[in-house]
Image (cartoon, rainbow, N blue to C red):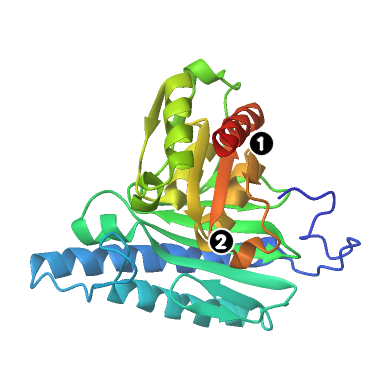
Amino acid sequence: MSDATDPTDATNPSGASVDALAIKDQVVSAVRELGRWAGSFAREARAGDGNLGTTTKTSPGDMVTFADAEVQRRLVVVLQRLLPGAGFVGEEGLDEGAGAEATWVIDPIDGTHNFVRGYPGFCVSVGLVVSGESVMGVIYDSVEDAVYWAVRGHGAWREDERLERAAPRDFAHALIGTNFTAASARSTVDQRVFTELARRSAGVRSSGSACRDFCLYAEGRTDLFWQFGLHSWDVAAGAALVLEAGGEVTFADAPDDWLRAEGLSTFAGEPALVQAALEVWRAASSA
């Protein structure tokens, strides 16, 4: 996901003309407001009749609530005003403007199962992709009640604090994040990768929210994140954070169009650890 040009620069040779930094504050404000609204909605529902408007999509763990649809709807209204003509990709059936130079990528509630059960935590995530590159990411983390954000060339931030990672750790001392899904449990490749990376590292943690895992890396709490079967709405905002924090983001399966790929085998974190993890994946895939 790296590129020699800067898509946030209106004069770069890619032809992109989006000033992501100029609209960042408005995106941050909207994401924060809607993240807090969603948290309040869930708490009030659980204190009352418990009805979050929950339905199941593909499996018992794949849920959607009223808040998912409502947050996505409200975000689209704000983002359309900020960047007329941009496309949209969102988890809740949103796919508009294919071929647009700039695309907003929305995960209205990442960690919906956490959200439904009151388990910490969930995220609201908005990424801006220009000419195939993540140039801005904004993520509200309900656990921290904080917004993490990054704009290409301007660093990774938690609120108004720039995030600076410590010196890289070797694999034996690395803390790793992942989310091992029901689909992963049915995949021998996923099982082999999980077992080997867990064996090599200091430990593996699961947050239940891929968006939150990207934030945890950017803040220096973990050193590597991997997960299989992700989609662009899980990745677009977090990729900007990881890259601006000095990390690497790679899709092992090298999709032609990662914005609309059915599943992304994603490795993100310290570059040396990402490369080592990719070697594990290659070995597991060929076994």
Q: Which residue sits at x=49%, y=40%?
A: 189
Farthest residue toward the front?
287
Q: Report how far apart the C-alphas of labels 1 and 2 lie in the structure.
A: 20 Å
Q: Could you say whether the residue bearing mark 1 is in a helix, strand or loop?
A: loop
Q: Nearer the viewer, residue 255 or 188?
A: 188
Picture quarter containing residue 218? top right
Percent across and percent down for residue 4 are 84, 49
Q: Nearer the viewer, mark 1 or mark 2?
A: 2
Characterize the local packing of mark 2: few (<14), some (14-19) or many (20 or more) Cα atoms within 10 angstroms.
many
* Residue type for callout 1: Gly
Q: Is residue 219 visible?
A: no
Percent across and percent down for residue 194 are 43, 34
Q: Could you say whether the residue bearing mark 2 is in a helix, strand or loop?
A: helix
Q: Nearer the viewer, residue 84 or 173?
A: 173
Q: Is residue 80 visible?
A: yes
Q: Nearer the viewer, residue 287 or 9?
A: 287
Sequence order check, earlier mark of 1 and 2: 2
Quarter of the figure with the C terminus: top right
- 190 above or below 47? above
Residue beneath label 1, please?
A: 246
Characterize the local packing of mark 1: few (<14), some (14-19) or many (20 or more) Cα atoms within 10 angstroms.
some
Q: Which residue sits at x=69%, y=48%?
A: 154
Residue beneath label 2, please?
A: 232
